Amino acid sequence: MKLEVSVCAGVMAAMVSFSAGAEQPAAEPPPSTPVEVSQSQVSTAEVSQDAPTREVHIPVSLSILPGLSTNGFSSGNVVNNLSIGLLATHAGRVEGTALALVGNWVDREMGGAELAVGVNYAGQVKGTQMAVGVNVARGSMRGWQAAAGANVAAGEMRGAQFSSGVNIASGASRGLQATAGLNVAPDLVGMQLSSGLSIAGRLEGAQLSIVNVGGDVSGAQVGIVNVARRMKGLQLGLVNVAVEADGANIGLLSLVGNGQHHVQAWGSDLGMANVALKLGGQYFHTLLTVGLRPEYNHQQRLWAAGLGLGGHIPVGPFFVDLDALASSLHEGQFISDSQHLLAQLRLVAGFQPFKHFAVFGGVTANTLISFNGEPLKGMDRWGLGRVFTSDSDDVRVQTWPGLVAGIQI
């Protein structure tokens, strides 16, 4: 009996112990302690990841092609003072001279002279690039480029470009572009010279080319054809075109948006009715003239075709024009040989009460040159002039003063 009671008591004690163990919560792990990393350690890690490969200085490099050179295969981190290639050279940076027949390639900065028959390329240029073919500066160019083919400065240019083909400066530039072909610069302070075409988006300086094209130009355009959006300064050429101009537009034909676009009709002491197209800028203009004196009193019909250049001085609603005109005179038919040339200096004053209407009048100084030695009737109506003849009497020169009056629309 005692044995049974002991066994039961042991079993009950074991069960109570197991229940207590099951209800006991599991021990939580100790909280983690934050690890502090200093800013200097982070910066050091970032720099170590971003920094380029350390440059290796090899003073002189001899090569056949990149890879077949004393720079080795990893020439992108090499700095040379003298790099000579039978065909081509390659270096990360050159502080001195690079020479090759086909081409030179400098990844970063070319400081000195880069000379090749074919192509020169550099990330940046501080010095000179000379090639028969093409020079390219991917970044800024401070110095000068000379090529028979093309020069390209993709970044800022400070210096000069000389070529017989094309010069291109893509960034803000200060200096000179000279070529036989094409100059291109979006933003230039300096000069463009070309026997072909020069183009500038914004220019402070001068363009001297056969054809000049500019956006906002402050300075001068001199060529056969000059075109600008906004012109402040001088346009001198056969044809001048500007949307807006403040200055002098001098040429055979000047089309200026805020300039003069008029038709004039006038009469004079010559008894001839004249019509002219007046085109130009604010202060200078061109006159394209035709005139007719009808046949009367046994005098043949007389035609005139002329060209004039003049200056215009506006003073409120008034203006003063000083014009120089030259006209060929044709007797009988308009299309016929001319034996007479009429030169006139005309000073007129005008009143313009409306934008498209004005009246004017003034005086003229006339010179008639007859190459057949025969006078034209009805020229010096008041007999105030003088006549001069050559020794052979083949050339006759007659001068006299006159009057002119007309309208302008």
Image: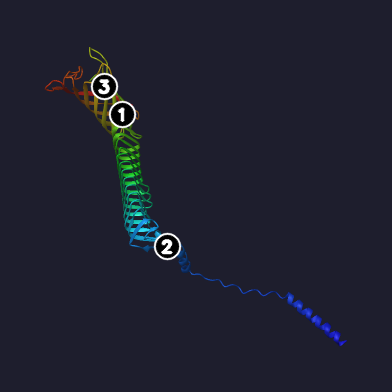
Q: Earlier in the sequence, mark 2 or mark 1?
A: 2
Q: Nearer the viewer, residue 85 or 377?
A: 85
Does the residue at mark 2 contact the one at mark 1 (Cβ under 8 Å)?
A: no
State yes or no: discs 2 and 3 in contact (Cβ < 8 Å): no
Instruction: Write down the residue under mark 2.
Output: 53
Q: Position of residue 235 (x, y in %)?
A: 30, 37
Category of crowding for the residue at label 2, using alpha-carbon neighbours closer than 10 angstroms: few (below 14), some (14–19), many (at least 20): few
Residue 121, compared with residue 23, is above or below; it is above
- What amino acid is found at the position of numbered circle 1 in the picture? Lys
Residue 90: % across, % down: 37, 56
Looking at the rendered image, the quarter that the C terminus falls into is: top left
Decide if residue 283 is in sight here: no
Which of discs 2 and 3 lies nearer the camera? The answer is 2
Q: Quadrant of residue 288?
A: top left
Q: Is residue 393 left or right of residue 206?
A: left
Name the one closer to the observer, 222 or 275.
222
- Say what amino acid the circle numbered 3 marks: Ala
Of 36 and 52, nearer the camera is 52
Residue hosting label 1: 278
Q: Nearer the viewer, residue 279 or 144?
A: 144
- The quarter holding residue 260 reads top left
Q: Looking at this view, name the residue that lies furthest to the bottom.
A: 2
Judging by the rendered image, the residue that carries numbered circle 3 is: 304
